[in-house]
Image (cartoon, rainbow, N blue to C red):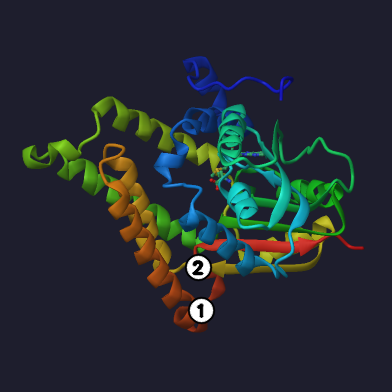
Amino acid sequence: MSSDPAPTPHATPEQVEAAWHDRKLANVLYHDWEAGTYDEKWSISYDERCIDYAVGRFRTAAPWDGRPYLRALELGSGTGFFLLNLMQAGVADRGVVTDLSPGMVAAAQRNAEGLGLDVEGRVVDGEHIPFPDDSFDLVVGHAVLHHIPDVEAALREVLRVLEPGGRFVFAGEPTTVGDAYARKLGQWTWKATTTLTKLPPLQGWRRPQHELDESSRAAALESVVDIHTFDPAVLEGTARAAGAEGVAAATEEFSAAMLGWPVRTFEAAVPPGKLGWNWAMFAYHGWQRLSWLDEHLLTRVVPRSWFYNALLTGTKPR
Ligand SMILES: C[S@@+](CC[C@H](N)C(=O)[O-])C[C@H]1O[C@@H](n2cnc3c(N)ncnc32)[C@H](O)[C@@H]1O
C-alpha cells in the first residue's frame, strides 16, 4: 500500500479540465472525491441487509456450493461493498480489494479493518492487474466493468490471475435499455426534488446550494466516467473472446430498478442523514418485493436485455 499513489479528494480546476479528455483520470478524481461519502450516498452497510444483497447477486450470477473460496480479488472495489460483504457471508476466506481510486482503496481497507477481515488493499487498473498468473480462485466486481475502457483486456487479465478452474463473478452492470430508463427517472426525480424543496415549508429538506451545484458538476463528469452499457449477449461474447468458459450473463431488476433509481436520486438530493433508518428499510423492502415480482413473473414476459442489472460469470479453462 505504501507505494500506492495518494488520494486526490479535492481536484484542482486544471485536473478537472484534463479529466474531460482522460477517462481514467476522470475515474480517479470522481471516485476519490466520492470515497468519503460513498457508503452514505448509496446506503451501503456491512450488516445483514447488504450481506444478503451481495450473496443474492453472487448466487444469481453463479453456482456456489457454500464452501469458501480461499483467496479472492475484487476489481473496482470502491469502499468494499461487494467483497467485504461476501467474505462476511463466508464466500471467501482471504481477499484483496483493489481500485483505480486510491481514496476508495483506503476507504475499503478502513472498512475491512473495522470488520476484522483478512484483507489487503492495492491501487490497481483493471486492464493491468499487478499479480502473478494463477494467484486467485475467485475474482469479483460490482458496477466496475462499465468504467473500464477495454473490457475484453480486463477480462483477459482476470483470467490470467485466476488459477485454472477459478471463477469470476461481475454484478451490477447497467444494460443498455435499463440505463436509458434509469437515467431519465433519475433526472426527473432530481429536478422534482430540487424544485419542490425551494418552497418555504420544504426548505429543511433542501441541501445547501453549493452542495447541489457540486453534485450537478459531478453528474456532468459521470458522462466521462460511465463508459459502457451492455447487451447481455454481447457481454457473454466478450467474456468468451477473452478466453473464458462456462460463460453466462443473467439480468435482473426491471420494476425494482424503476423504484430504485428514483429512490437513490431522492436520497442524494436531500441532506445526508435526513431520511434515517426507517426510510432505508422501507426502500429496501420495496426493492425486495418488486425484485420478487421481476424474478417470478416479469422474467417470463420481458426480454432479458430490458432488465437493468447484468451479471456475468465464467471460469478459467482447466
Ligand atoms: C460505481 S463504483 C462501484 C464501487 C463498488 N464496487 C460498489 O459497488 O460499491 C466503480 C468503481 O470502479 C473503479 N474503477 C473505475 N475504473 C477502473 C479501472 N480501470 N480499474 C479498476 N477500478 C476502476 C472506480 O474508482 C470506482 O470505485
* In-front residue for pair 277/254: 277
Question: Where is mark 1, residue-wise?
Answer: 299
Give coordinates of residue 310: x percent, y percent.
58, 62
Give coordinates of residue 111: x percent, y percent.
56, 37
Q: Residues within 10 Å of mark 1 (few under 14, many from 20)?
A: some
Amino acid type at circle 1 is: Thr
* In-front residue for pair 309/137: 137
Question: Where is mark 2, residue-wise?
Answer: 307
Sequence-wise, which precedes: disc 2 or disc 1?
Answer: 1
Up the image or down, 141 lies above or below 288; here it is above
Up the image or down, 238 lies above or below 211; here it is below
Give the quadrant of the N terminus. Answer: top right
State which image quarter holds ligand 1: top right
Give coordinates of residue 132: x percent, y percent.
88, 40
Q: CA distance from mark 2 to mark 1?
A: 9 Å
Amino acid type at circle 2 is: Phe
* In-front residue for pair 41/94: 94
Query: Which residue: 44% across, 69% down?
Result: 254
Secondary-structure class at tag 2:
loop
> Can you name the residue that lies furthest to the front here?
116
Up the image or down, 308 lies above or below 124; here it is below
Up the image or down, 103 lies above or below 239; here it is above
Query: Which residue: 52% across, 60% down?
Result: 53
